[in-house]
């Protein structure tokens, strides 16, 4: 848990670290730095040395980020450095160097100046006393495997919405219960649900996490393989994630009760049609069919038709003029019919959305579970509709003649 900033009066932070250590830390701290601060101090990064440890921190009133940095820290001290100024000086300090030399260059910050073996330059600073108080971190409730956490977050994110007038759809719904941390996201056309085993407090907790934040955290820290802890303070709406030396506390800007009530439309029993498909072949076919559909005039919503047979799935581009549809010959892709009752028509889907959905799978095969041509169909890794920790529900397009 992050401790409140506290240092001797007028004592400034003094520390030494490599260029890579500092620049990597600043990339993460940037999540808590206001891009266009309403007040100048919010454009600062707080550098604190305490008990021989250097911590860099940022807070934009919505997200607080704290990063412990390897290196050498001096006596307890506190400095508020202009974030963009520090970042630019760091980049300039290794200009012209080879990557390995630049990464290993030792950077020393002594209060208001930055030094390397080659030069010393002053830094732009702000007044720490004017900086807002950091929010308290939510106590850790559960711990999950970092590699699995980031893998499943990356699979859920493509299903989040972008319509800012519907804030619940721009968030990922998080639920902690019975030793499972469940992540759900929907844009009303797709619903992605992932489950990660968790250890810790079994109390049922729900919260909404901004999808933009999870996306950026995954890109920055997604290679982390150690534990990740998650905590939700239901009284103050703060959510805290701890990933190694990084602690991120963010405010839930949407209410968990506003997340669409979608659970009843997820199939819980075997569907009439179930096909195991070759993933790469299906992606290739859908990509071609989507491009052809766009070329024939359906650029804003390119349609793809999926027809099922004993040997797999036939993928065809959708035509703008339905009279032309019978003239289309599709691409046959290999597959195995697991449960076979013929549908009374093709599944018609948005090709771009389907490509996004297929991109969340990495195995050689995936399984498509269909009910009727007009009901949502399900994609899973394995043969069961329960999924293997991940399920993606997809809405078909209802085309009227």
Image (cartoon, rainbow, N blue to C red):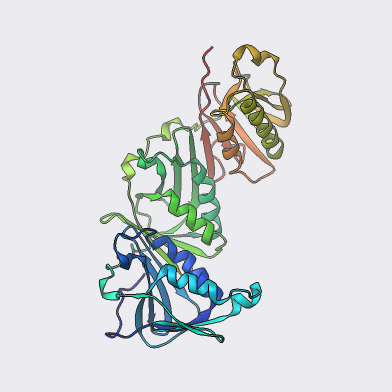
Is residue 82 or residue 322 the one in the foreground?
82
Give the x, y percent position of residue 41: 31, 68
Q: Residue at x 58, y 80 (%)?
A: 105
Label total for image? 0
Please tell me in which quadrant of the rendered image residue 117 appears. bottom right
Where does residue 126 sit, x and y in percent of width and height? 33, 74
Q: Where residue 22 appears, x then y in whole percent?
A: 50, 74
Residue 213: x and y in percent read 43, 54
Q: Which residue occupies the foreground of this view, 322 or 311? A: 322
**Residue 365 in which image quadrant:** top right
Using residue 160 as the reference point, say whether residue 79 is left or right of it: left
Quadrant of the image for the N terminus? bottom left
Above or below residue 316? Residue 388 is below
* Residue drawn at (67%, 13%) of the image: 326
In the rendered view, tell whether residue 84 sits above or below residue 330: below
Quadrant position of the C terminus in the picture: top right
Residue 163, quarter of the rendered image: top left
């Amino acid at each position: 848990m992050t401790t409140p900033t506290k240092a001797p009066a007028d004592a400034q932070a003094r520390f030494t670290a490599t260029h890579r250590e500092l620049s990597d830390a600043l990339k993460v701290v940037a999540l808590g730095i206001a891009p266009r601060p309403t007040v100048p101090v919010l454009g600062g990064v707080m550098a604190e040395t305490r008990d021989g440890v250097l911590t860099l921190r940022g807070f934009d009133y919505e997200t607080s980020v704290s990063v412990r940095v390897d290196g050498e820290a001096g006596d307890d001290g506190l400095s508020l450095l202009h974030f963009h100024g520090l970042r630019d000086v760091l980049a300039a300090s290794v200009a012209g160097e080879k990557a390995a030399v630049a990464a290993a260059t030792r950077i020393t910050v002594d209060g208001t100046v930055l030094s390397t073996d080659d030069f010393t330059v002053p830094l732009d600073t702000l007044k720490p006393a004017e900086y807002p108080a950091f929010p308290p971190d939510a106590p850790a409730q559960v711990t999950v495997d970092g590699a699995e956490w980031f893998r499943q977050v990356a699979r859920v994110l493509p299903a989040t919405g972008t319509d800012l007038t519907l804030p619940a759809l721009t968030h990922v719904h998080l639920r902690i219960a019975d030793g499972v941390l469940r992540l759900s996201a929907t844009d009303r056309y797709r619903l992605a649900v992932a489950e990660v085993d968790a250890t810790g407090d079994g109390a049922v907790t729900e919260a909404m996490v901004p999808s933009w934040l999870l996306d950026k955290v995954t890109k920055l820290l997604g290679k982390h393989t150690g534990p990740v802890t998650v905590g939700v303070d239901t009284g103050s709406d703060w959510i805290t994630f701890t990933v190694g030396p990084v602690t991120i506390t963010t405010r839930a800007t949407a209410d968990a009760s506003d997340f669409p009530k979608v659970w009843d439309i997820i199939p819980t029993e075997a569907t009439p049609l179930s096909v195991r498909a070759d993933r790469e072949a299906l992606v290739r076919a859908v990509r071609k069919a989507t491009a052809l559909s766009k070329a024939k005039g359906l650029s804003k919503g390119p349609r793809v038709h999926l027809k099922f047979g004993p040997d797999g799935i036939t993928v065809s581009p959708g035509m703008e003029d339905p009279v032309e549809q019978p003239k289309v010959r599709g691409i046959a892709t290999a597959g195995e019919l697991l449960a076979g009752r013929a549908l009374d028509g093709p599944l018609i889907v948005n090709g771009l959305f389907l490509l996004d959905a297929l991109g969340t799978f990495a195995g050689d095969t995936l399984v498509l579970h269909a009910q009727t041509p007009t009901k949502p169909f399900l994609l899973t890794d394995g043969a069961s509709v329960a999924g293997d920790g991940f399920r993606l529900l997809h809405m078909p397009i209802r085309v009227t003649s």
